[in-house]
Image: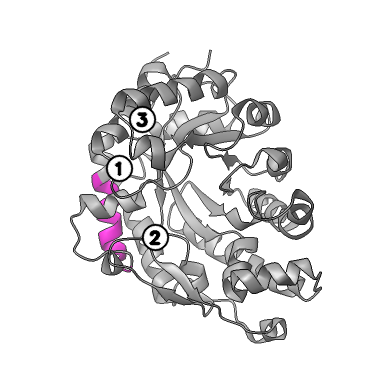
Amino acid sequence: MAALSSIERTSLVLQGRLPDRVPVDLHDFMVTARLMNVTSYADYFRDGAAMAEGQILAWRRFGHDVLLVENGTAALAEACGVQVEYLDSSAPVAHEPAIRDLDDVARLEIPDPYSVPVLAENLKATRLVCHEIGDQAFIIGRADQGPFSLAAEIRGMSQFMLDLATSDERVFALLEYAYQVVKRYALAQIEQGAHGTSIGDSPSGPDVISPAMYRRYAYPYARRLAQELRAEGVLLAYHICGNSTPIIADMVSTGAAIIEIDQKADMHTCKTAARGQTTLLGPIDPSEVLARATPDEVMAACREALEVLAPGGGFILGPGCALPATTPDENIAALVEAARRYGRYE
């Protein structure tokens, strides 16, 4: 088969077909800050034009198929009133919750992505990337956190977990609010020209809560988001960090176009659950392998993943989560080269 463009290659995979090779993704927003030689990550992650330049610079250097445009895990939380700390050498983090009582949910307003500065800058980044290379690479404009994760940041993680443990029914009003915020922002990312959007909902995974709690509090909102976005022609990628194996069948059944898995998930179980249903993305360890190993070791880890996850289609090779800023260029190049050299679906 003749070589395809990155958009053609990725689109065929998402349609359940077999292109020339496995596409490769880089979850590299931290790496882009390093490549840009910025003196303050805090300034960089609030500057849409700079973030776009960094994404394009990384793409020109590494030639990956799929770009994930974002500035971390706290943008929507900040838009909802959470105090966020911007760090000089890392991604921004949620610092203080927006509400102290679940009854306060009633006073929260759904933020306008185009008028809240942090969201507007993220949208600018997506728009500029799409304008510059959107006809050459598959662009995912990240919708930040999923409803469960956003609710946890708005309430504060410890208090939110206590709400779940005590079965406080008022938590559903918070989850509904968070759902509406996430969906509005997801659609805004598509309005910038992105080919798809994505959410991370890691606090809902088995490393934090039980599968039973996941199915009660997180799954209904993730499924509804995937289904409603699909009805509007929008592709959603869905990520939960950690060992998602116990809930992988549930994640697949949400109808999300892409399920992102990390190194803790059992590849064979995930492949069985996803086969013919969705596309898996991952699962190369970003910290111990991509950031710390040798290029040969990166290549070996990628070959192992390709052997298990590529046959029959439905697979995009990439990191299991965000790459640390310190990830060596030669290891990123090895990841991309592994897909080109060994990424065949047969």
Q: Residue 72 carries which label?
A: none
User: Could one spot residue 278 in this view of the protein?
Assistant: yes
Q: Where is mark 1, residue-wise? A: 327
Question: Where does the magenta region start and end?
Answer: 46-57
Q: Position of residue 183 (x, y in %)?
A: 60, 62
Residue 303 rendering spot, x and y as whole percentages: 44, 20
- According to the picture, the residue beneath numbered tag 2 turns out to be 71
- Which of marks 1 and 3 precedes in the sequence? 1
Instruction: Tell me, yes or no, whether the two marked residues, 1 and 2, touch with CB atoms within 8 Å.
Output: no
Location of residue 60 by image quarter: top left
Residues packed near mark 3 inside 10 Å, few (<14), some (14 to 19) or many (20 plus): many
Which type of secondary structure does the marked residue at label 1 adopt?
A: loop
Q: Give the CA distance from mark 2 to mark 3.
A: 22 Å
Residue toward you, 204 or 106: 204
> Toward the viewer: 41 or 80?
41
**x%, y% of residue 290?**
36, 36
Tell me the SS state at disc 2.
loop
Indicate the quadrant containing the N terminus: top left, top right, bottom left or bottom right: top left
Q: Mark 3 points at which residue?
A: 335
The residue at the point 52 percent across, 51 percent down is 197
In the rendered image, residue 283, in percent from the top left (x then y), is placed at 50, 35
Q: Nearer the viewer, residue 177 or 85?
A: 85
Choose top left, top right, bottom left or bottom right for residue 267. Answer: top right
- How would you classify the magenta stretch by its main secondary structure? helix
Is 292 placed left or right of 208 in the picture? left
Magenta span includes 52:
yes
Query: Quick one: 163 or 199, which is closer to the camera?
Result: 163
Q: Can residue 131 be seen in this view?
A: no
